[in-house]
Image: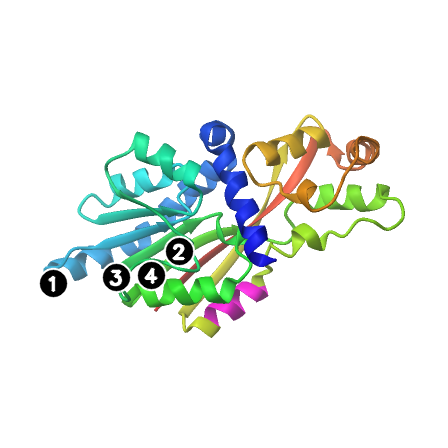
Amino acid sequence: MLNFIDKKIRQAFSDAALHYDVLASLQKEIGRDLLARLRSVENQLFIDEKIGQREIAILDIGMGTGWLTKRLADFFVDAKVYGLDFASGMVEIAKGKYDEFHIIQANACALPFKEKSFDLIISNLTYQWIMDLPKAFDQAYHQLKPEGHFYFTLFGGETCQELFVSLEKTAKDNVFDQQLFMKRLGRRDQVRKALEGSGFKDIKIDYERIKTRFPDMLSLVKWLKDIGANTLDRDFFVGKDWLNRANDHYNQTFRDHLGVFATFEVIWVKASK
């Protein structure tokens, strides 16, 4: 069952690859902030490099179409940078756009590298789609060199809470089960526990809630589908009548002076080996 779900997610992101960069402005904004946070490790990495006369290696897990990976390569100009994604459509787009870094198709739970290969591993808004966080973090831990750094973001459990409240409030016959989607979005305590179980140290977890504007709930659902992030309708049938009821509830309940909003909880994590 888990393999079936992962295949559906992989296909969804592959299908979205062609217009992903146009629609993914929120991901890019968070990615820019993630790059800014890497300045705290930049000096340490390259001081160690000069002392040891070795090449720095960096891995971006869940690169999408390679937008952030390209900026990593520009930012760490003397490093060997790898971008990895499990969706073939994303990989194909990245290969057609960039030659500044190595591009690999693989799963975050089965990284195809030797142990202790990387000084720095980053990931931007990927781990919320991974069912087995402990396994994925184990993989990252083993791929890091001693004293290596792990920086990543993921969407937390409060993400799109307005959407699920609206669906729940307008469902009939108790057919709605938000666990079909929400189980994929880790809570901060789950993330910390999984990191500690993998052996990471110096774990620091922060979070923020970002309100993003949409014309209405249906526009939010379309946006989620267009970026490959909405697999809810493949798990059970949400008919037109239910969507319209939920849309009315959403528009009446989750609106302020700027219009209809959706909450995205962003979890920021940094850890060391």
Residue at 42% over, 37% down: 90
- Name the foreground residue: 272 vs 37: 272
- Name the foreground residue: 204 vs 111: 111
Q: Earlier in the sequence, mark 3 or mark 2?
A: 3
Secondary structure beneath dot 4 equals: strand
The label nearer to you, 3 versus 2, is 3
Residue that carries the numbered disc 1 in the rendered image: 51
Q: Earlier in the sequence, mark 1 or mark 4?
A: 1
**Image quarter for residue 94?**
top left
Judge from the rendering whether residue 242 lies leftward or rightward of residue 128; answer left or right: right
Residue at 24% over, 54% down: 57
Residue that carries the numbered disc 4 in the rendered image: 149
User: On residue 117, which mark appears?
Assistant: 3
Secondary structure beneath dot 1 equals: helix
Q: Main secondary structure of the magenta part?
A: helix
Whether residue 143 is visible to the viewer of this picture, yes or no, is: yes
